Amino acid sequence: MAVYLDHNASTPLDPTVLAAMRPYLGTRFGNASSLHRFGRSARNAIDAARGQVAALVGAAPQQVVFTSGGTESDGLALFGAAAGLAPGRLLVSAVEHSAVLEPARALARRGWELALLPVDRDCRLDLDALDAALAGSTVRLVSVMLANNETGVVQEIAAVADRVRAAGALLHVDAVQAAGKLPLDLGALGCHLLSLSAHKLYGPQGAGALVVDPMVALEPLVLGGGQEQGRRGGTEPVAALVGFGAATALAVAELPGRIAHLGALRARLEAGLRAHPGCTIVAAGAPRLPNTVQFALPGYDGGALQMALDRLGFAVATGSACHSGRPSHVLEAMGLAPEVARGVVRVSFGKDNRDQDVDSLLAALGSLRSALPVSAVSGGG
C-alpha cells in the first residue's frame, strides 16, 4: 500500500469537502451572476464560502478575492498592488516560491528595482538586512512568505510588518503553506495582502484567495464581467469555491488537534533519522511547520533516493513540486553545502498519516542504506 508523504505539494480532498461540493457539480449548476433562483443559489453558496475563508484568517468577507490558486493570488498581489504605485524598490525574500519570484522579476523588467533579502543558514530572514534595505531608497512593496514550502521554516512576519509599515510600504505574505497548519490572524500578522490556496488544506485544486486590506488599491489581472468586486473577472467556479470554504471551516475546527498530531509525527521521524550516521536535518534549529522534515543522508542523491522510496511505496519530494529536478534556490540561499543539498529529501505529513507510516519509512531508509552501496543510489557527484 502506498504511503503519501508529500502534503506540501497537494493534499487529498477531504470527504466532507467533497460532500459539500457535490451538489454544485450536478443539480446546482447556476451562474452566480444570474438573477434567477439558480444564480441566486450559486451566489449564496459563494458568499458563504467567502465568509468561511475570511474566518480562517480573521478578515472581513469583503476582503477576500477568490482566484484560481496560490500562484494567481501571488501574481495579483504583486502586479495588482504595483499598478497603483509609482515604480520604486521591491524587496522579496530570497527563499520565496517562484509564484512570487517570477512576478517580482517581471516587475524589475518594467522599471522596479528588485532586491532579494538574504536568509541565514536556518532559512530565517535577516532582519538587519531588511532594516538596511528599508533605510535606502524608496521601498514601496515587500513580499515575505510565512512558511517555506521546502524547509517548513516559519518567518517572524509580525516583526517584518512593523518595519515595513514604519517605512510606509505595503507587505504581501504568501501563507499558502501555513494555512491549515498554523493559526492565522491577519491583524496579528500585520500584512496588507495574504495569499491562500485550497489544495494545500484538503480542498480542491484550482481555487485560491487573496485577502486584501481595504486601504490597498488593487488593479485586476483578469478583466471581464466585474466579478469579485471588480478585482478578478470570470465566472466563479462555484463547486471549487464551496470546497475551499468547507476546507477552511474544517481547518478552523481541527487545527489544535492537527498541530499536535503532525508535530508528534515530525518528532518521531526526526528521532529515527538521527540514528542514521551523518544525517542532516535541514533548519532543525528554526521554528518550522509541524508537518515538515527536510533531510539529507550523506553521499546519497536526493532524486535517486526519492525514486527508490517510490518503488517501495513512499511518496516523498526533493523540494518544491514546481521545481522538481532543478537545484533548490532555497537551499542555495541558505548556504547549504552542495554535497548536502544534492541529497535533500522532504517529507510533509498530513492529518491522516499515522505512527506506522513513520516507522515504515524509517525501516525503508534503513533497508536502502544497508542493502545498497552509496554508489548505487548516488548521483555520482
Image (cartoon, rainbow, N blue to C red):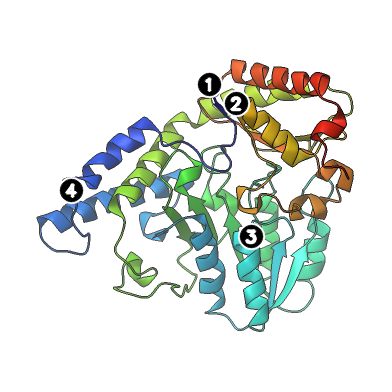
Mark 1: which secondary structure? loop
Q: Nearer the viewer, mark 3 or mark 1?
A: 1
Question: What x and y, as percent, mark residue 59?
Answer: 44, 52
Q: Which residue is mark 1?
A: 1
Q: Number of callouts in the render?
A: 4
Q: Quadrant of residue 87?
A: bottom right
Camera sees residue 201: yes
Query: Is 362 rendered above or below residue 103?
Result: above
Mark 2: which secondary structure? loop
Q: CA distance from mark 3 to mark 1?
A: 33 Å
Q: Earlier in the sequence, mark 3 or mark 4?
A: 4
Local crowd size for mark 3, using a 10 Å CA cut-off: few (<14), some (14–19), many (≥20): some
Could you tell me the amino acid type at mark 4? Arg
Mark 3: which secondary structure? helix
Could you tell me the amino acid type at mark 2? Gly
Could you tell me the amino acid type at mark 1? Met
Q: Which residue is mark 2?
A: 313
Q: Which residue is mark 3?
A: 98
Mark 4: which secondary structure? loop
Whether residue 248 sits left or right of residue 132 in the image: it is left
Q: Residue at 51%, 55% (x, y): give it.
A: 70
Looking at this view, is 279 or 247 the one in front?
279
Whether residue 6 sits left or right of residue 122 in the image: it is left
Question: What x and y, as percent, mark residue 286?
Answer: 77, 39
Question: What x and y, as percent, mark residue 315?
Answer: 60, 33
Question: What x and y, as percent, mark residue 120?
Answer: 83, 50
Q: Which residue is mark 4?
A: 28
Q: Earlier in the sequence, mark 2 or mark 3?
A: 3
Q: CA distance from mark 2 to mark 3?
A: 29 Å
Local crowd size for mark 1, using a 10 Å CA cut-off: few (<14), some (14–19), many (≥20): few
Q: CA distance from mark 2 to mark 1?
A: 6 Å
Q: Earlier in the sequence, mark 2 or mark 4?
A: 4
